[in-house]
Amino acid sequence: MRAERPHFLKGGILRRFGLSARLLLLTILFVMIAEVLIYVPSVANFRLTWLNDRLAAAQIAAMVLDAAPDQNPAGDLEMRILSGVGAKAIAIRGGGRRSLLATGDMPSEVDKTVDLRSVTWVQSIRDAFDLMVNPPTHPVRIIGSGMGVEFVEILLDTKPLRNAMLIFSRNILLVSLFISGLTACLVYFALQWVIVRPVRRLTGNIAEFSRNPEDASRVIQPTDRADEIGLAEQALARMETTLADELRQKRRLAELGLAVSKINHELRNMLTTAQLLTDRLDRVNDERVQNIAPRLISTLGRAIAFCEATLAYGRATERLPQRQLIPLEPMVEDLAHLTDLAPEKGIAFERHVPEGLVIDADPDQLSRILVNLVRNAVQALSQAGSFEGSPRIAVSAIREGNAVVIDVKDNGPGIPERVRADLFSPFQGSARKGGTGLGLAITAELVHLHGGTISLAESNTGTCFRVQIPDRQAA
């Protein structure tokens, strides 16, 4: 069974107080625990001291009585001595003889015998609390060491001792309450000034900053403190400054993106109209027009494609993958028809996928990943040709532990070094003339949604993109 937490920890008492009140309560609690640890041995020591004082007084009284035996014919002196000591009987053994002083009303029995000559601290503490909680009804025999004698023994009524111990306990309690209250107040104000107020300043600034993160005036101003609070203030100031700058930049980019989308939309409409008008040039018999028209139509087509790609990328919000176990070989076979995009180049398509290889991925998104990579390879080979031999594209795949690794390789001229750093960035990573660079950016986004990676693998010739898709448990 799972252990239940105490109610005051689960959300009852302590959660109703703030940090300062909790510190105050805990300080009082810890001081009271310390006072209890001091009180327990103190009350035991008080009892031992009280009893030893009575034994010493009893021995002195007995010595005085022995020094003047003739002056006590009626026992008046003996009675006064016993009354002063608070004992009903005193016995001293020393020098080979035993002296006894006793009152007339000797008790018939005693409740217990306490030998102070061999008492331990544990026993002394236990006896002290037993005396206060369960006081004896009959006198107690106390035995202790004396000066120049074997032992001193007295019969003692414990009621005065118990009263003295209760008074001592009351005084200890009052002093403990005063000390704990004073200490708690000092600790409270010290922590309030040193810790709580700076923490409240931090939390207050976080709440204020969250209302308008782009407002630079809300960034916390660090103090000159060199402790952990000061380090936290400096770290928070750096974080808020960075966040405010990034939010302002993203807002400007969002506004710029909206404006670009509107411009692209209108520009696409105008270019489409221009393309329709340009198509009529094919019916003009002028030789110069016939030479210019194809290039003009091609240029307009690339411009329209660029506008459409930009609009599509701005609207795209990829959904989370709906992953399932799918065989990879049939999906790779379906890619072979993409070489028909450049039939005049005679591009060969090779596939090296083990039969029965299964991948854990979204079928639609994985198909888009592979189609983008193979189509890029076809376009690169159609524009720049092959590096050696006839143009070809090879798709291979293997399983490595909990992931499937797919390589899409061509024997084209490769990717220039100048574009490799921004290869997967939109509008920057295209090595093809007229390309937007959005294909690889979208492909990388789809791969990352699967928890995978895409990279440019080392290759002696051409280009090789490596995609790694981990299984759901590994991801």
Image (cartoon, rainbow, N blue to C red):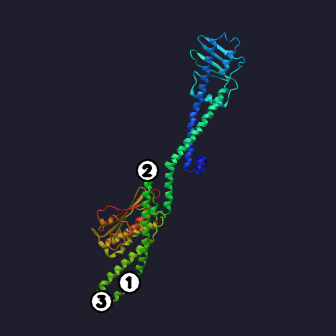
Up-down relation of residue 183 to residue 82 (above or below): below
Badge 3 marks a residue whose secondary structure is loop
Q: Residue at x 51, y 59 (%)?
A: 207
Give the mark, 3 or 1, whose residue is nearer the N terminus. Answer: 1
Position of residue 285 in the picture relative to residue 35 (left or right):
left
Dividing the picture into quarters, in which one does residue 161 lie? top right
Confirm or deny contact between disc 2 and disc 1 (CB under 8 A): no
* The C terminus - image quarter: bottom left
Tell me if mark 3 has few (under 14), some (14-19) or many (20+) residues whose alpha carbon lies within 10 angstroms of its own: few
Q: CA distance from mark 3 to mark 2?
A: 83 Å
Q: Which mark is residue 286?
A: 3
Identify which residue, 293 or 196, lies in the foreground.
Answer: 196
Tell me if mark 2 has few (under 14), some (14-19) or many (20+) residues whose alpha carbon lies within 10 angstroms of its own: few
Amino acid type, mark 3: Asp
Amino acid type, mark 1: Ala
Residue 116: x %, y % from top left: 59, 22
